[in-house]
Structures are given as C-alpha cells and as structure tokens.
Image (spheres, grey):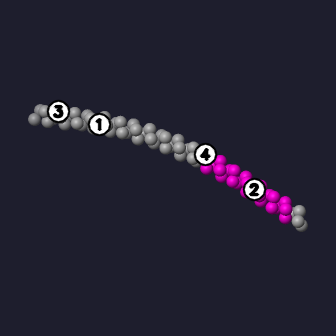
Amino acid sequence: MKKCLALILACIIALSACSKNDEKATLEKDIDKLEKQNKDLKKQKEKLQKEHDKLKDKSDSLEKDVNAKM
C-alpha cells in the first residue's frame, strides 16, 4: 500500500513538473510573439509619423501658396 501511494505521489510530482515546463515554454513563446508585434507596431508608428510630417509640410506649403496669391 505504501509503495502504491509513493508511486502515485511520484507520478503527480513528475506530471506537475512537466506541466510547469510546458507552461513556461508557452509563456516564453507568447513573450517573443508580443515583442515582435511591439517592434512591428513601433516601425508602423514611425512610418505613419513620417507620413504625417510630410503631409503637414505639404499642407503648410499649399497654404502659403494660397495666401501669397491673395
């Protein structure tokens, strides 16, 4: 009976350890995925900011042209 309980306890401990390793690996993959997504979003933000600045400059230029003609 004691051997059976010891075997069951050993199995539970082994399965718990495996579960924690799988969970850790899953979390690490999620972290990597989120870091990549964050990097991509930062690049997209920079691109949009440059486009915004470019359009702002064009708008200012057109406004100056309109004011100069009046």
Q: Amino acid at mark 3?
A: Asp
Return the disc, 2 or 1, that comes first in the chain's sequence. 2
- Amino acid at circle 1: Leu
Q: Residue at x 65, y 52 (%)?
A: 23
Vertical relation: 12 (above or below) 63:
below
* Helix, strand or loop under label 1: helix
Q: Residues within 10 Å of mark 4 (few under 14, many from 20)?
A: few
Say which residue label 2 marks: 15
Between marks 2 and 1, how big is the CA–CA gap?
A: 59 Å
Q: Are marks 2 and 1 in contact (CB under 8 Å)?
A: no
Callout 3 environment at 10 Å: few (<14), some (14 to 19), or many (20+)? few
Three-letter amino acid code of the residue under disc 4: Lys
User: Would you call the spot at circle 2 few (<14 residues within 10 Å), some (14-19), or many (20 or more)?
Assistant: few
Which residue is pictured at 49% across the width and 40% down the height?
A: 39
Question: Residue 15: which quarter of the image?
Answer: bottom right
Q: Which residue is mark 1?
A: 55
Marks 1 and 3, the one that precedes in the sequence: 1
In the rendered image, residue 43, in percent from the top left (x then y), is placed at 44, 38
Image location (x, y in percent) of residue 29: 60, 45
What is the x, y in percent for residue 35?
Answer: 53, 44
Residue 32 part of the magenta-drawn span = no
Amino acid type, label 2: Leu
Query: Which comes sooner in the sequence, label 3 or label 4?
Result: 4
User: Which residues, given as a range, are shown in magenta?
Assistant: 5-28
Say what secondary structure mark 2 lies in: helix
Marks 3 and 4 close (CB-CB < 8 Å): no
Residue under label 4, please give it: 29
List the residue tagged with mark 3. Answer: 65
Cα separation, mark 3 vs mark 4, equals 54 Å
